[in-house]
């Protein structure tokens, strides 16, 4: 039989140890690894964004359930199978606005969002995703505020990782209160 005092103490810890207003991820190794890498580069950590995490999780679900690797529509594409505007994101970036608008379309986040995605057919880990991004100038520049991202200050970040995909969304606006 479980000790009643133990149950009461556990309930108190759960109530006071997991306050929603902190808006900090409890266990998100991808979020932590990206910020750790930024700190290694003497960059500030990017604050956690619940809104961008919702967008990341939503896109991750769409990728897992509906995306088929092809040469036309890349990993930033969104299917027609959800409550969002679908788009085929092509290498010429003509559909970039479709991706940038997703945070405003899916949440109350007021700014644009910028996404990086990693895919590994045998399954992905946070460590492997970060290595893939670090070895890609385009993705590494976004994470490390270099190149065309040099004058940008990321004020929000959301992440999601599962099965074969890892997704990170960056934003220039703070998380709405």
Image: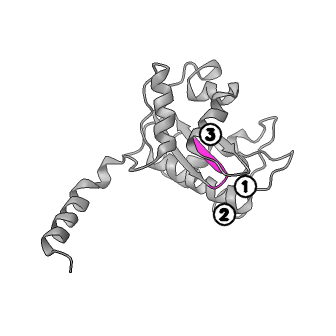
38 or 59, nearer to the observer: 38
Main secondary structure of the magenta stretch? strand
Q: What secondary structure is marked by label 1?
A: loop
Q: Which residues are magenta?
A: 163-168
**Foreground mark, 3 or 2?**
3
Gap in Å between the C-alphas at discs 3 and 2? 29 Å
What colouring method underlies this structural image? one colour
Quadrant hosting residue 16: bottom left
| Residue that badge 2 annotates | 82
Q: Earlier in the sequence, mark 3 or mark 2?
A: 2
Is 166 part of what is drawn in magenta? Answer: yes
Is 123 or 84 nearer to us in this picture? Answer: 123
Q: Residues within 10 Å of mark 3 (few under 14, many from 20)?
A: some
**Residue 59, percent across and down?**
63, 53
Please name the residue shown 67% across and 35% down the image: 132
Density class for disc 1 (Cα within 10 Å; few <14, some 14-19, many ≥20) is: some
Residue 71 counted in the magenta span: no
Residue at the bottom extreme, as displayed: 1
Instruction: Identify the residue position indicated by label 1 in the image.
Output: 86
Residue that label 3 marks: 128
| In-image side of 108 versus 76 (left or right) | left
Q: Is residue 110 something that shows in the picture?
A: no
**Extreme residue in the right direction:** 71
At x 48%, y 49%, the residue is: 51
Q: Cβ–Cβ below 8 Å for labels 2 and 1?
A: yes
Q: Position of residue 89 (x, y in %)?
A: 77, 44
């Amino acid at each position: 039989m479980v000790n009643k005092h133990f149950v009461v103490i556990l309930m108190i810890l759960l109530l006071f140890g997991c306050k929603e207003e902190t808006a900090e991820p409890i266990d998100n190794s991808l979020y932590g690894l990206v910020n750790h890498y930024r700190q290694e580069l003497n960059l500030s950590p990017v604050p956690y964004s619940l809104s961008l995490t919702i967008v990341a999780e939503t896109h991750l679900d769409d990728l897992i359930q509906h995306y088929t690797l092809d040469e036309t529509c890349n990993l930033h594409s969104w299917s027609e199978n959800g409550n969002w505007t679908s788009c085929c994101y092509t290498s010429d970036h003509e559909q970039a606005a479709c991706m940038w608008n997703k945070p405003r379309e899916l949440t109350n986040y007021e700014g644009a969002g910028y996404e990086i995605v990693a895919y590994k057919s045998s399954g992905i880990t946070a460590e492997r995703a970060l290595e893939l991004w670090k070895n890609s100038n385009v993705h590494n520049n976004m994470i490390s505020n270099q190149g065309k991202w040099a004058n940008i200050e990321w004020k929000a970040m959301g992440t999601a990782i599962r099965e074969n995909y890892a997704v990170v969304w960056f934003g220039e606006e703070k998380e709405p209160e």
